[in-house]
Image (cartoon, rainbow, N blue to C red):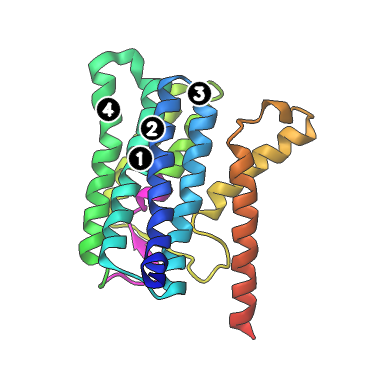
Amino acid sequence: MIHIIRTSIPNIFTLLNLFFGFLSVMYSASGDYRNAAILILIGMMLDSMDGRIARMLHVESELGKELDSLADIVTFGVAPAMMAYYAYFSYFGIVGMAIAALFPLFGAYRLARFNINAVKSSLKYFTGVPITAGGGLLTLLTFFHGKMPGVIFVIAFFALCILMVSTIKIPSLKEVPLPKYGIIITLFLGYAIYMVFRKEHHRFPYFIYVAMPLYVAFIGYQLVRFKKKKQ
């Protein structure tokens, strides 16, 4: 019984990642891009945690790896693409739908390529931009919808699609004592601090109150582990 619970814990984090990705799609459809973005942010945190928890509990499994890929394509492929569609591409009808669909299509190809080459891959770099990083960057751009020219967003959108399937070597930064994609997450939190400074925190997307404590707790855990390794 205890073993079943231990093996289930990382998968629960992965399924929560998928759940928040689905919720993000729902919020995008209603035009609430801020909460849609925060939900993807929470998904990024959970994605950073599930693999580490599995290794910590010594319960890594093929099921967990496959489940992680399925969750990633929803939370970091479909959900950001839906944000982009409703914010920018919906004005172009079926052509806009086809353009938005490119992001999860390229992301799925990138995930499949990573999965079959995972054993051969170096720990020092990724080949192409990971779908999680690509989805996070696309989310960040859409988060500031209306504050940048649409042409810049479109260029960035296509650039991210191409970079995901490219063979460019991206440093993995696995030795840095921060959660994966910490820079993207920190930009969101920087926005939160800015809102507090301007005394406009009442305008926070309410899911940020889930995201911030989760991120602070996990980064504290990472720093403690990093110090123990150095001792």
Q: Amino acid at mark 4?
A: Ile
Residue 122, magenta (yes or no): yes
| Picture quarter with the N terminus | bottom left
Please state which of the two labelled residues, at mark 2 or mark 3, is closer to the viewer: 3
The mark found on residue 155 in the picture is 2
- Residue type beneath disc 2: Ile
- Does residue 140 appear anywhere in the picture? no
- Spatial CA distance of label 1 from label 2 is 6 Å
How far separated are the C-alphas under marks 4 and 3?
A: 21 Å
Task: Report the residue marked by disc 4.
Answer: 99
Q: Is residue 180 left or right of residue 215?
A: left
Mark in the foreground, 1 or 4? 4
139 horizontally vs 157: left or right: right
Q: Residue at 56% of width from left, 52% of height from top?
A: 183
Estimate the spatial distance between the alpha carbons at disc 1 and disc 4, rounded to whole Å. 13 Å
Horizontal and vertical percent position of residue 105: 23, 40
Q: Which residue is mark 1?
A: 159
